[in-house]
Image (spheres, helix red, strand yellow):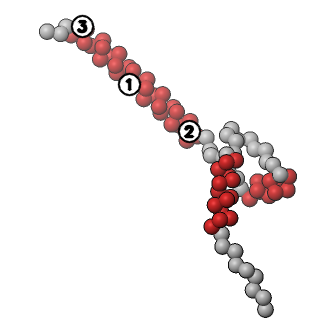
Amino acid sequence: MIDVKIVWPVWWILAGLVLVAWLSLRARFRESIRRAPPTLDDDAIRRIEEYGSITTDEDEPLDLDEIRKEEFLFWEEERWDEAEEP
């Protein structure tokens, strides 16, 4: 038969590891929620148009490949009507 004196410490160690893992994941999740995603508002776009670049205080830089892809998709999907002549 298994000695109880050996089993209880093993269970306490496993419970402690599970608790530490849970607290670690909770802390990471809270940190990811606390950080706001990068924003690009109308004022920022006007500054880009005027100066050619933008400086932000945000941690993560803008993803230029994603911006190019979205811009390309916008111009591809947009249908431009020819000007009507009177």
Disc 2 element: helix
The residue indicated by pointer 2 is: 32
Q: Is 38 on the left or on the right of 11, as rendered?
A: right
Task: Report crowding for label 2: few under 14, some 14 to 19, many 20 or more residues within 10 A (C-alpha).
Answer: few
Q: Going 85% across and 56% down the picture, which residue do you hit? A: 50
- Callout 2, which amino acid? Ser
x and y percentages locating residue 72 in the rendered image? 67, 59
What percent of the width, then of the height, locates residue 25? 47, 31
Are dots 3 and 1 in contact, CB under 8 Å?
Answer: no
Residue at 38% over, 20% down: 16
Q: Earlier in the sequence, mark 2 or mark 1?
A: 1
Residue 36's spot in the image, x, y percent? 62, 44
Q: As shown in the figure, which amino acid type bears the numbered disc 1?
A: Val
Question: Which of the 4 image quarters holds residue 13?
Answer: top left
Look at the numbered disc 3 and give the secondary structure of its residue: helix
47 relative to 63 in the view: left or right: right
Question: Which badge, 3 or 1, is on the more N-terminal residue?
Answer: 3
Q: Which residue occupies the foreground of this view, 18 or 61?
A: 61
Residue identifier under label 1: 18
Q: Nearer the viewer, residue 84 or 41?
A: 84
Residue farthest toward the right in the current orientation of the protein: 51
- Give the amino acid at mark 3: Lys
Gap between marks 2 and 3, in whole Å? Answer: 42 Å
Q: Residue at x 61, y 40 (%)?
A: 35
In the rendered picture of this protein, how many numbered marks are placed on residues?
Answer: 3
- Report which residue position mark 3 lands on: 5
Question: For mark 1, does the 10 Å Cα neighbourhood hold few (<14), some (14 to 19), or many (20 or more) residues?
Answer: few
From the viewer's perspective, is the residue at label 3 or at label 1 nearer? Answer: 1
